[in-house]
Image (cartoon, helix red, strand yellow):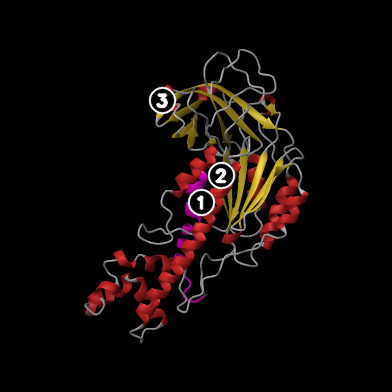
Amino acid sequence: MRTRLLTTSIARRCALVVLVGGSVGSALLAAAPQQTFRSVVDLIALDVQVVDGTGNPIGRIGPESFDVSIEGKKRTVVSADFVSHRGVAAGAETSDTDLVQEATDARTFVLAIDSGSFEAGSARPIMDGVRAFVDRLGPEDQLGLYAYPTEMWIAPSTGRAQVRAALDHVVGERERLRSRFNLRSSEVVDISAQTTNPNSFLTNSGRLTGAAAEVQAALDPVLRVARRECPDDPQCPMMIYNEGMLLAGQLQATADASLDGLDTLFRRLAELPGRKAIVLVSSGVLISDRLDGRPEVPLMAKTLGQLAARANAVVYTIQFDTEQPGMASSKGIGTPQLSRERAMAGNWLDNFSAEAGGLRIYVPTCCGTFAYDRVLRESSAHYLLGVQPEPADRDGKAHRVKVKVDRRGATVRSRQWVLIPVRH
């Protein structure tokens, strides 16, 4: 679609109908509020966040300070307008407000609750924190809700009563690991990789003696568990292996449900106009840190990041550490295992949030007030960049986009994908 830049301020709206990358609290813009353009050039609209160390938006940055590249090739930034939203709640103040343009539209938030990541009984205090966030939104902000895997959906609106009532029915749905041998999720991941482990008891059982057998026992996750749980039973290793593979399937199903829920959400949001900020509430998506282990989700962060671009959405992930992730029992607990499991539960969310232009905020205890404060601050204003593309960019496909800013102490949050329609 052709975007024409005007020499005077565009009254209320201008037709920047393109699919572009955005940032935390901003996404593709189907319309731009009160923009001033200085020449007649085809541009794409790219909205980004520029924040300080505490999440406050930074004003007073001109187009010359932005560096935008698509597929590694620099593109000219023609304009950079700082837009603040009306109806922003207290605690979300922006800096340099004398340069602020006030948006004609308020923000659109969609609460995405991954109830399948919470165990039964653990979600209630989390929902109390979500309700407090809802109460702090501005009166003009639109709010929607999607809870999955139950697929509870409320379309965004300025009403709050339906969302508040629905939150009362969001409960934890994750099944706890139940293990005869007290297997932890990290041990399940290691056991699932046994078929490619050269030290596996599956391939070396009974063949090694002496020091070699000791080394094998130290490196083989099944034999380590057997030493802890059943050192005198020669049949125990195979039973541990079989249980580990069964639990790996359970972890895989939990991860798949989380990602399927996000896929469904973005496809649904693609049908709604305007930019949206997704507030994803989760206790984590545990993904194997071994290439040959389970659960595995190849390329899903990239794929979902592209879907977020098509849906004109960016993602703030608030991850609650409601318990030691994936623990089957208290037996054999150790700090290294806990650290590794916390990393496995959060790493994928980190990558996905970055692909979708946002960030993951880790909350070690209930109820995450500081995390919601950050969301409100960062979403209170954004820059709308007018970027001049090359003809090759206009192919309707997803392209990598990177945005940098020449400002000390500033952090840019920009979605990593841009989709520009073919010009007709």
Region in magenta:
330-357
Magenta stretch: includes residue 343: yes
**Residue under numbered circle 1:** 349
Q: Residues within 10 Å of mark 1 (few under 14, many from 20)?
A: many
The percent position of residue 210, horizontal first and vertical second, equals: 22, 80
Any part of residue 54 in sight = no
For label 2, the SS is helix
For label 3, the SS is helix
Magenta stretch: includes residue 339: yes
Q: Amino acid at mark 1?
A: Leu
The percent position of residue 380, horizontal first and vertical second, equals: 66, 36
**Residue under numbered circle 2:** 267
Res. 168 image quadrant: bottom right
- Between 364 and 253, the one lying in front of the other is 253
Residue at 70% in and 23% down: 12
Any part of residue 86 in sight = yes
Residue 392: which disc? 3
Q: Residues within 10 Å of mark 3 (few under 14, many from 20)?
A: few
- Between 310 and 346, the one lying in front of the other is 310
